[in-house]
Image (cartoon, helix red, strand yellow):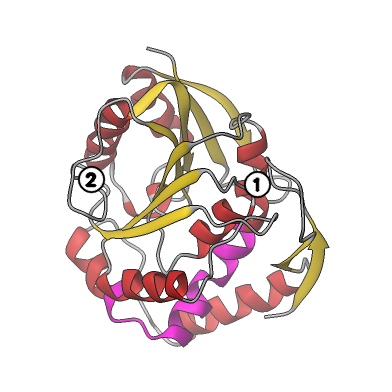
Amino acid sequence: MALKQAPFRSIGGKHTAHHVQIPSLASLFSLKWKQFKVETIGGYHFRGQEKEFVHHAYNGMDDNVFSAINGAQEWINWRQIPRSLRKSMHHHGPALIVDLGCGPGSSTRILSWYGSPAWHIIGIDFSEDLIRRAKHLSEIGGFRTASGGRPKVEFVVGSVVEPLHDASGVRIKDNSVDYVNSSGIVGHHLDKDNFVRLATELQRIIKPQCWAVLDSGPHLKRDVIQPIMEQHGFSLRAKVRGVPLDPRPQLIFQKTS
């Protein structure tokens, strides 16, 4: 993957490091081609909404296949996640962040970089293989802020449509979470019924006036996501796109009741 050095600011603290590697604009075409070769030419099927099918597909992926199918999504994440944070998380103090469908920690790494050392981030994914890779990345110091700080990061094997818990197995407390991020799981892998289960859990765990930032996608779009979130006490505050006219924006919801 072609990478470049590009300056970005975290939302809190002074900087001792001013650069982060993000995929270049030109690399998107190469990433999409790699994805096409694996999915269409290679016939590797992973898109779907049936839990056991998706679990089997992701749990059996080697690093090369996962990098090929997730490269374009990671490219989008490097643009969407910081923009979503800037539109919502305005305080720099302690906060509990939940990263749904964190995979091997790629989205968690972006949240860490643009976040605060005072944050506690819980990454959740139902693939044991991907969580094992995320934990290894944590062990070698892969999660830092732009200022060089180290937020507390932990990873959990779990389903996003069941009660959410931390790494010790304790259920996340009611009204305790400041920010929930979802990048590439809601819009791609949840059906309406499962999303209602997730929305119910988000209503339980997120603090009043705090945030749920959810990806829309080909299988679950805004016209389904928004009314369900509104029924669970959230209001849509903004949409964030990776590129202009991107049909899969992140939707920024605030808990208002």
Above or below residue 129? Residue 209 is above
Amino acid of disc 2: Val
Q: Which residues are magenta?
A: 57-77
Q: Which mark is nearer the camera, 1 or 2?
A: 1
* Horizontal side, residue 249 vs residue 233: left or right: right
Q: Is residue 66 within the magenta segment?
A: yes
For marks 1 and 2, give the CA distance.
25 Å
- Tag 1: Cα neighbours inside 10 Å, few (<14), some, or many (≥20)? many
Question: Mark 2 = which residue?
Answer: 161
Which residue is at a point 47% across and 36% down the rendered structure image?
Answer: 95
- Where is residue 83 drawn, in percent x and y? 67, 42
In the image, 18 versus 106, the foreground residue is 18
Residue at 30% of width from left, 76% of height from top? 129
Camera sees residue 81 = yes
Q: Quadrant of the N terminus?
A: bottom right
| Residue 215 shown left or right of residue 129 in the figure | right
Relative to residue 152, is residue 58 drawn left or right? left
Mark 2: secondary structure:
loop
In terms of depth relative to the viewer, which is nearer, 165 or 223?
165
Determine if the magenta segment contains residue 76: yes
**Which residue position is annotated with label 1?**
82
Cβ–Cβ below 8 Å for labels 1 and 2?
A: no
x 60%, y 48%: residue: 81
Quadrant showing the C terminus: top left
Q: Residue 189 at what x, y percent from top left?
A: 34, 54
Magenta highlight: main SS: helix
User: Residue flagged by tag 1: what amino acid is it?
Assistant: Pro
Rendered view: 199 above or below 248: above
Give above or below for 18 relative to 31: above
**For residue 134, above or below residue 226:** below
Going from N to C along the chain, the mark reached first, 1 or 2, is: 1
Given residues 162 and 142, the one toward you in this image is 142
